[in-house]
Image (spheres, helix red, strand yellow):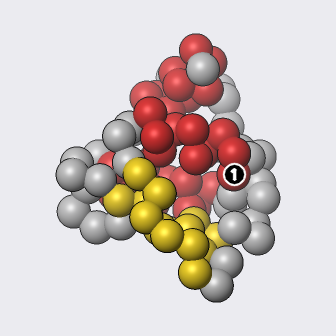
Amino acid sequence: MSSKSLKNISLKTFRKYLEYKGLKHQRTRGGHETWAGKSVKRPIVLQTHLDPIPEFIIRNSLRTLGADREDFIEFLING
């Protein structure tokens, strides 16, 4: 298990991860971005005024994507 934390992940980095997973930015309304794709049952909503993203939002988004922590950490390491 990696010791890399899910804290202090910038909004820009998480957006790149969502694009990597095949999601597309649908809209921004009132400080909330909506990301959706064919691989997810429901959209992922990010608050644009929170940077870095709180860890619980990242964990919930990973669960919605069907991805695990190790997949995300591998993306952070390999870019």
Going by the image, does 65 lie left or right of 8? left
Q: Quadrant of residue 29?
A: bottom right
Crowding at mark 1 (Cα within 10 Å: few <14, some 14-19, many 20+): some
Quadrant of the rendering where the C terminus is positioned: top right
* Amino acid at the residue labelled 1: Leu
Q: Quick one: which residue is furthest to the top in this view?
A: 78
Q: Nearer the viewer, residue 71 or 29?
A: 29
- Is 58 situated above or below 78? below
Residue 11: image x %, image y %?
Answer: 69, 51
Q: Residue at x 41, y 51 (%)?
A: 24
Residue wearing tag 1? 11
Going by the image, does 71 lie left or right of 51? left
Q: Is residue 7 visible?
A: no
Q: Residue at x 63, y 55 (%)?
A: 55
Residue 74: image x %, image y %?
Answer: 52, 21
Q: Residue at x 47, y 57 (%)?
A: 25
- Is 49 situated above or below 3? below
Residue 71: image x %, image y %?
Answer: 43, 29
